Image (cartoon, rainbow, N blue to C red):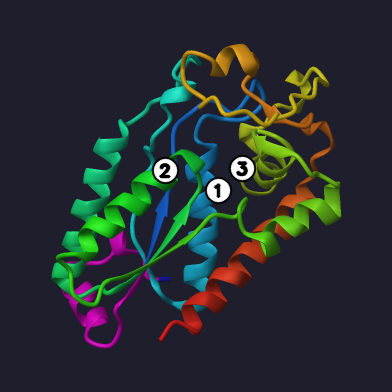
Amino acid sequence: MNLLADLSWYDIQEYLTGEDRLILPLGAVEEHGPHLGVGTDFIEAEAIALGVGKATDVMIAPTLNYGMSLSQMGFAGTISLRPATLTDVLEDILHSLHQHGFRRILIVNGHGGNTASIASAVQTAAMDLPGLQVKNFQWWTDEEAYRVIIETLGEQTGSHASLGETAFMLAVRPQAVKMGRLTGRDAPVLPSRELTTVQNFAKLYPDGIMGLNPAKATKEAGEALLKKCIEICAKELKQWQ
């Protein structure tokens, strides 16, 4: 497996003589209810990236663990970057990669709060970096991937620390899951024009879970979801001209 962190500059230069693709996992450190570890988002993104790298031999960059999680700052352990900070960090990463010869970057994003900064960074970087191409995979917004959770667990309205993420973590990091702490409470995400911020998030979701009670999540569903995510991303890379 081509892990950039394990390779010397000489090895990376040799890789770049015949390849310009790279996988960049991106996550966050934030609360995920009383039952999941705060590293859930980057753990899941990294698990997908490692699986895709193994399937395709495309190089994998070190995971960017921190993301934009300001709305969850009311919960202990959340560590957030400001949106502008994350945008700047991503721009700098893209500039560095481009300088060395990477042109096609697949971001595997594990946190919805990062999406706006990813889009902003890519748009800005593309103005200065000829040939740059970036794709962004998010398993919970990918219809094909999320269908696995719907078909196995029946979830229709999960958003954060709900059935999908709990199943995923049972598959990839079971020691960071404490199902006994669940209360059985559903927290439906209702349509609203009000933006979710640190001022209202904890009031709306006092235990940090958004969506259906995740008590029915299973390791088997998480394994099926991970397999599907790897399959989708590997196909995307192989067909990327």
Q: Which residue is mark 2?
A: 114
- Residue with the mark numbered 1: 44
- The percent coordinates of residue 159 (x first, y second) are 65, 37
Asked whether the beta carbons under mark 2 and mark 3 sit within 8 Å of each other, the answer is: no
Residue 182 circle label = none
Pointer 1 local density, CA inside 10 Å: few below 14, some 14–19, many at least 20: many
Label pair 3/1, CB-CB below 8 angstroms: no
| Viewer-nearest residue: 171 or 155 | 155
Question: Earlier along the polypeptide chain: callout 3 or callout 1?
Answer: 1
Residue at the image position 52 percent from the left and 76 percent from the top: 236
For residue 29, above or below residue 51: above
Q: Residues within 10 Å of mark 3 (few under 14, many from 20)?
A: some
Disc 3, SS: loop
Which portion, as a residue range, is magenta? 2-22
Q: Amino acid at mark 3?
A: Arg
Residue identified by numbered label 3: 173
